[in-house]
C-alpha cells in the first residue's frame, strides 16, 4: 500500500455509501491522529484500537443523523505520495467556507487548517473532509 491515508479515507467513504455502522482499517499513529481530529470535529462517533496476533487495527464508528444520512458528505486526499503539497499558514484556505475540515501535518503535530491559521504554522496538507 503506497498511500495509507487515502486508503483509510476510501474505506470510510465506501462504508458510508453502504451505511455500515463501523469500518476497520490498519493501525498507524498518523491515522489515529487524523481520526482524533475527525472525532473532535464531529464526523465520526468514536474509534478504537484493537490488537490481534501482533497486528493492530482501528475500528471506526461512523456517525449518522436521525434520518439515517451520513454526517460525512465527502473526503479528499490533498497531498499524494507522488506529489506532496506543502503550504504556509497564510496560504491555507478554509474548507467549504468553514463547513469542512482540512488536516495538516505540522512540525508540532497533526492540526486542522483553523488551528494552523491561528498558530501561524504550515506543513503538509494531508486531506479534507466535509
Image (tube, rainbow, N blue to C red):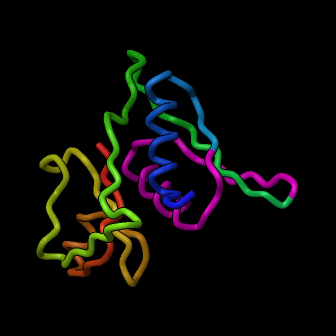
Give the residue at the far front of this rendering. 82
Q: Residue at x 74, y 57 (%)?
A: 56
Identity of the residue furthest to the top in this view:
67
Q: Is residue 115 above or below residue 10?
A: below
Q: Position of residue 103 (x, y in %)?
A: 34, 61
Q: For the C terminus, which image quadrant?
A: top left
Instruction: Give the number of callouts.
Output: 0
Residue 109 versus residue 36 in the image, above or below: below
Q: Which residues are magenta?
A: 25-53
Outermost residue toward the right? 53
Residue 48 placement, left or right of 121: right
Which residue shows up at 33% across the image and 64% down it? 79
Above or below residue 111? Residue 60 is above
Residue 86 at what x, y percent from top left? 26, 75
Relative height, residue 118 to residue 46 (above, below)? below
Lateral position of residue 55 relative to residue 24, left or right: right
Tell me where residue 18 appears, x and y as whole percent: 49, 22
5 or 23: nearer the viewer: 5
Q: Nearer the viewer, residue 122 or 61?
A: 122
Q: Is residue 29 magenta?
A: yes
Instruction: Confirm whether the magenta stretch covers residue 19.
Output: no
Residue drawn at 52 percent across, 40 percent down: 11
**Foreground of the two, 62 or 128:** 128
Position of residue 10 measured from the top left corner of the image (x, y, whole percent) = 46, 42
Going 57% across and 57% down the picture, which residue do you hit? 1
Amino acid at each position: 500500500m503506497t498511500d495509507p491515508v487515502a486508503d483509510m479515507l476510501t474505506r470510510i467513504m465506501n462504508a458510508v455509501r453502504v451505511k455500515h455502522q463501523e469500518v476497520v482499517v490498519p493501525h498507524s499513529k498518523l491515522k489515529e491522529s487524523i481520526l482524533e481530529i475527525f472525532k473532535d470535529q464531529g464526523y465520526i462517533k468514536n474509534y478504537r484500537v484493537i490488537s490481534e496476533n501482533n497486528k493492530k487495527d482501528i475500528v471506526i464508528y461512523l456517525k449518522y443523523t436521525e434520518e439515517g444520512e451520513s454526517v460525512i458528505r465527502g473526503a479528499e486526499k490533498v497531498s499524494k505520495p507522488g506529489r506532496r503539497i506543502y503550504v504556509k499558514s497564510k496560504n491555507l484556505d478554509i474548507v467549504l467556507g468553514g463547513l469542512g475540515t482540512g488536516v495538516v501535518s505540522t512540525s508540532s503535530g497533526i492540526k486542522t487548517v483553523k488551528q494552523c491559521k491561528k498558530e501561524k504554522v504550515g506543513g503538509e496538507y494531508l486531506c479534507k473532509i466535509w
